[in-house]
Image (cartoon, helix red, strand yellow):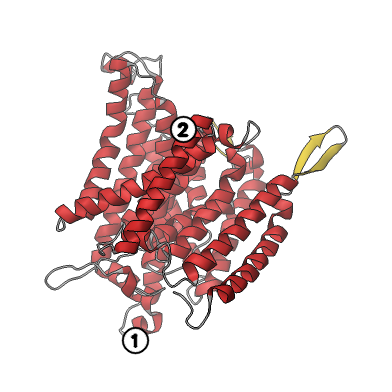
Amino acid sequence: MGETGKSFGQRLQAAIGDALIGGIIAFLLFSLLLGERTVDSVTGLTLKPRPMLLAIAVGIVVAGRLLLSLFVWHAEYPITTPFAKLFTRERFDRRDLIVLCSTAGAAALILIVGSIAGAPVLVLIGTLVLGFLFGGALRRTIVFFFPDLPYARIFTIGGILFAVLFPICSYLIEKAFHPGLPLRYLLDLSILVLTYVMLGWGLNIVVGLAGLLDLGYVAFYAVGAYVFALLAMHFGLGFWMCLPIAGAAAALWGITLGFPVLRLRGDYLAIVTLAFGEIVRIVLLNWTNVTNGPNGISGIPKPTFFGLPFTAAGPVTFASFFNLKYDPLQGIIFLYYVILGLAFITNLVTLRLRRLPIGRAWEAMREDEIACRSLGINTTVTKLTAFATGALFGGLAGCFFATRQGFVSPESFTFIESAIILAIVVLGGMGSQLGVAIAALVMVGGFEALRHTDWLQDIFGSEFDPALYRMLLFGVAMVAIMVWRPRGIVGTRSPTIVLDKAHAISKDLVREGRA
């Protein structure tokens, strides 16, 4: 809100100072990240300066801080107010309508000018702004005419139906009408997203429900993958036989990790779990007699459909048994449904456990461990069960990862994977199953899609590689969500136990670390 007693000139002076400080910090941070680029030449690696890119990045920071200070943070009427009201039930006043109409008109003008001048940057800006306004207006219209509909349940059911029907429907449409859909890419991306959804739901048990900050979750992911790979390589066991073994082995490692950290909380627990994840990766990297070291393990078998392999040739294959023409997409679709089933099982088990005494003990320990002990709850068993259950689902996901890739190596289980999974849990809303799924879709699916967006080259130049800026955009998205939605994408909480009727707990009534 606006600072009382200060004129516009005083606020402008303070805003310019704040913007200059932000620009200096941005210059120091981006001078090596964006201002220099390593180039492989005949003489070796050399640094190529990129002053224009650095200047643009610093200019964006300075202009952004200046505008935010003047019109949002210290303004009597924050310019973002009407845009926030688009996604609430608050009534618009005259100023809100003027701002929204002016923004829509300016966006339409930018879109028209960009289309006439052939400027894809202007077209993109105009399209995004108009799409945002249209989405908010559509949401308010639906809520106005149907205020009492269970929107969360409708959204959840719709998402489940889409996930179940998407592969079959898209496959049939492609075979019947040949629209040229990139089915292989879409299915691979969907499998990747579902894998991270399952990992996020598994870590959500440890972090979101039990309140134990785990930075080494990728270790259980690696244990599940390597258990299946080693059993398949030495004993010839298949995927379905190794799946429960991999989950049990990861759960055992979860208990092994849980014992040394029983007395640790907060940052100390995070450091120990981080070290555990790195220990597992280094062991896999150096124990070459067992894990084959950095060369990894290849030739991991694919899952079968009741013993029917998805291969082109063989005595009895899936295609020959059902009298179908062989198509490589059949095996990919089956893998999709395997990870979808595993994700559903993870979700259902988590929801069921939340309503059991052990789930209520997790949430009680998350709120206050001392009070939890004073009530007679065995925190040792509670912590160990949380680690074991979360590790179990991580091991199952690792087993699927191994059969999906057909190859595992220590490079697939670095700390960045743990950071991404934890970011999905935090950004989605700790303890929220729906929020974790949405965050995985946005953070993994959205940024992986950037690898195959040719239109970005038209905007930023032919040398622009979106994959190089993937983690930068990932960090910007994390900062934006933490600033505007500190409780995550889904900030509301549903009580685990109710006496009569459940009422969602608003995010405004939920403090950090409280339910």
Residue drawn where x is 27% and y is 44% of the image: 159
Q: Amino acid at mark 2?
A: Gly
Q: Quadrant of the C terminus?
A: bottom left
Front-lying residue, 444 or 61: 61
Q: Quadrant of residue 389?
A: bottom left
Residue drawn where x is 49% and y is 30% of the image: 116
For label 1, the residue is 374
Total marks in image: 2
x%, y% of residue 311?
Answer: 40, 19
Numbered tag placed on residue 17 in the rendering: none
Mark closest to the chain's N terminus, 2 or 1: 2
- Say what secondary structure mark 2 lies in: loop
Q: Is residue 462 above or below residue 20?
A: above
Numbered tag placed on residue 236 in the rendering: 2
x%, y% of residue 459?
Answer: 57, 36
x%, y% of residue 223?
Answer: 50, 49
